[in-house]
Image: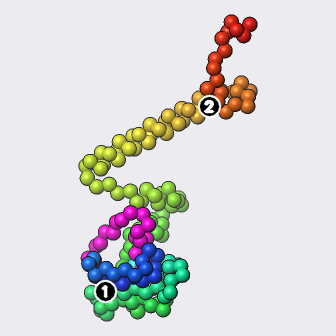
Amino acid sequence: MITLLQLIRNIGQFDSASGAACPLSRLTLIYAENGRGKTTLAAIFRSLGTGDSLVIAERARFAAANAPHVVLNCNTGVATAVFQNNVWSRTLDNLVVFDDLFVDQNIYSGLAVESGHRQNLHELILGAQGVALNQRHQELVADIEAHNTALRNKAGAIPVAERGAFSVDDFCALQGRDEEASH
């Protein structure tokens, strides 16, 4: 088990990061804003579990003076796992990272997991107020979709020959003709 991120250097968002103030437990949830290094951490952990150095090499910092370097404290067997010179000093074969890549590789639904599916995998709402707000949000999204469908149907009902070179919006903005003035 990984107990501490001692050092992560020249990988993804991490120039030289020490996790001395952030010990890890058997089950650790990592959350943060987009672009803060969560996927990079998942890649590092996955690499430690599989021994695949390519996962880290692909995330090496551009124009960094030194190669990627990771030092993780563990509580089993050898006390540390070190990634240096593109190889791990050891692996943790019982390490599992539950992220979108895990879902993509381990769940078969008969359909491809596409970006929209992955996006939904990252939705997590905590608390009754958050759930209620999300339900209201979903209702508003459904209302907007219904409104847009109605607009498309109405736009499709105007024959192209009637509106000529006008767009639907420009055609609808035209002033009506007075019947008596047209005779």
Q: Residue at x 40, y 75 (%)?
A: 41
The image quarter containing residue 25 is bottom left
Residue 27 image point, x, y percent? 28, 73
Which residue lies under the disc numbered 1? 73
Please, is residue 37 above or below residue 68 in the view?
A: above
Which residue lies under the disc numbered 2? 169
Q: Label 2 neighbourhood size at 10 Å, few (<14), some (14-19), many (20+)?
A: few
Residue 177 image point, x, y percent? 66, 15
Magenta span includes 179 = no
**Res 47 visible:** no
- Disc 2 marks a residue whose amino acid type is Asp
**Res 79 visible:** yes
Marks 2 and 1 sit apart, C-alpha to C-alpha, by 64 Å
Characterize the magenta stretch by its predominant secondary structure.
loop
Please, is residue 147 above or below residue 63 in the view?
A: above
What is the span of residues highlighted in magenta in the rendered image? 23-44
Magenta span includes 38 = yes
Q: Identify which residue, 6 or 107, lies in the foreground.
A: 6
- Disc 1 marks a residue whose amino acid type is Asn
Residue 108 image point, x, y percent? 48, 64
Q: Nearer the viewer, mark 2 or mark 1?
A: 2
Q: Residue at x 38, y 73 (%)?
A: 97
Please, is residue 7 above or below residue 162 in the view?
A: below
Q: How is the image coloured?
A: rainbow
Q: Residue at x 59, y 29 (%)?
A: 154
